[in-house]
Image (cartoon, rainbow, N blue to C red):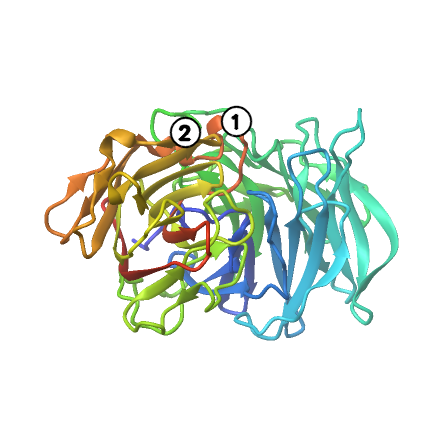
Amino acid sequence: MAQPIVNPVLTGFHPDPSFLRVGDDYYIATSTFEWFPGVEIHHSRDLIHWHPITRVLTESSQVDLRGNVSSGSIWAQALSFDNGLYYLLFTDVKSRRSVYKDLHNYLITAPDIRGPWSEPVRLNGSGFDPFLFHDTDGRKWLLNMRWDFRKSHSNFSGIIMQEYDLSTGKLTGPVHEIYKGTPTGVTEGPQLYKRNGYYYLLVAEGGTGVNHMVTMARSRSLTGPYETDPDYPIMTTAHDLNYPFQQAGHGSLVETQNGEWYMAHLCTRPIPGTGTMNPLGRETAIQHCVWTEDGWLRLAHGGKLPALVTDAPDLPPHPFEALPERDEFDSEELGYPYQGLRIPFDPSWVSLTERPGFLRLTGRESLASLHNQSMIARPIQHFACRVSTCMEFKPVSIMEMAGLVLYYDDSDYYYLRVTADEVRGVSLGVVLCRAGKYDEISSMQISVKAWERYYLKAEINGRDIIFYASPDGEVWTAMCTPLDFGTLSDEYGGKLGFTGSYAGICAQDLDQQSKKAYFDFFEYKALEG
């Protein structure tokens, strides 16, 4: 029996998939929000095995995210290909905590999926989730949802479309409103396809929470009117809140070389028994789809629920070598899976060459900063895992800190850090922030002034997190009683965020912005199958 597709295919924080086939190669681009480098692209040849190949936005000249609110910045990119050129649209969201969003929609291009990519060209700011449709007549059209900030108006005021002029690099002609959505509301994420004389519009509806869904409409004319599938939605988990996947929506389609159809979409896996606590964030899954005789798309396995396991296409297997669990920091450049917050990697704050075999972080702003943090981190991808590091660091004041962090955003994190104070001298303990409220586990702060090195680790098991510390990596001391992994979720504290939890290392120097911490290794090890 052929190997199936086991969902999710991209675990951990990999939301808003944009699905593309070019020849025998398949690509999925996912959103990165405030994490930088931005826009991640994975590659496959069989839809079963996936491997990261690049992150697109690597320099501040491409996009400046400093000061952007958490769960803002890079939203719902759209990857496409036409006439030898890759196109990538993305939104830089500057505001999201008021009625205004301050949206900047950009287009970049590259002759190769790995780049180099062109400098971004700003197209519009009327809404988010931009998509570029390449029609068979050679014309190109920009679609996005339109955001309406006015009182007594729906914020989601329709899907609009305008022609993009390739020769000038600008939008031209009238703006067409092509779809108002269904009574479900919150119509966004437009994707447009052409098949058998119809233009098919695929949209996300219901919001990105538990009512999320995928809806389709079609028209014989590009500009509409678009008829909604009478049996909408194609897919949702809104009617089964106990299903292992939740929040299924934001679909994107490809047709295989053999004429089969597949849809990539986002979903979450809540901690069992919690309903909505999803600290792994929004992940990417793939569904096998079929067309009905009257031309509507359906899940191949039937029903509306996304399959946990689905049939793979008839393509040659193409596995990739597994990524290493442990990084000894013996390279000269940081690569996958690391990201920082809002800013590029720069020798002024992170270096692998200053002390060969170590990663050096120069302490800067606090974990609450929206500007210049010194953190490198990677998504947490499993409900059972262990994260560990070894650090050398000699603080002299409470302003200097460094250590191991489990981070959702500036309002929610756990931090096992070394610092110094006037009572214990160099000390080690856990600080935390929940829904924006800072706290310290004071009863378990310990003096470590005799330690030469600090071995730090965090173990996650279901909903429980426990931090440990050791002077030698052999004898470990628990630094807390179990902490709640659910804190690092989108819904915690009512914040309605859009990202996922990360594990990483960081350093702060709130005074001189110059204290250095040296890390000997970083390891992420899954403890579940």
Q: Above or below — where is 517 with respect to 430? A: below
- In what element is the residue under mark 2? loop
Q: Which mark is residue 345?
A: none
The local secondary structure at tag 1 comes to helix
Q: Position of residue 392 (x, y in %)?
A: 26, 58
Q: Is residue 507 above or below residue 348?
A: above
Residue corresponding to mark 1: 494
Q: Residues within 10 Å of mark 2 (few under 14, many from 20)?
A: some
Q: Image height check: is 364 above or below 269? A: below
Q: Nearer the viewer, residue 10 or 472?
A: 472
Residue found at the far left of this picture? 475
Q: Residue at x 54, y 46 (%)?
A: 290
Amino acid identity at mark 2: Tyr
Q: Earlier in the sequence, mark 1 or mark 2?
A: 2
Q: How many marks?
A: 2
Q: Nearer the viewer, residue 103 or 215?
A: 103
As drawn, is 47 to the left or to the right of 422? Answer: right
**Front-most of residues 28 and 337:** 337
Residue ID for mark 2 = 243
- State how far apart marks 1 and 2 are (Cα): 22 Å
Q: Position of residue 395 (x, y in %)?
A: 32, 52
Q: Could you tell me which residue is drawn at 39 percent across and 58 percent down?
A: 515
Picture residue at 52% right of the left edge, 62% below the top: 344
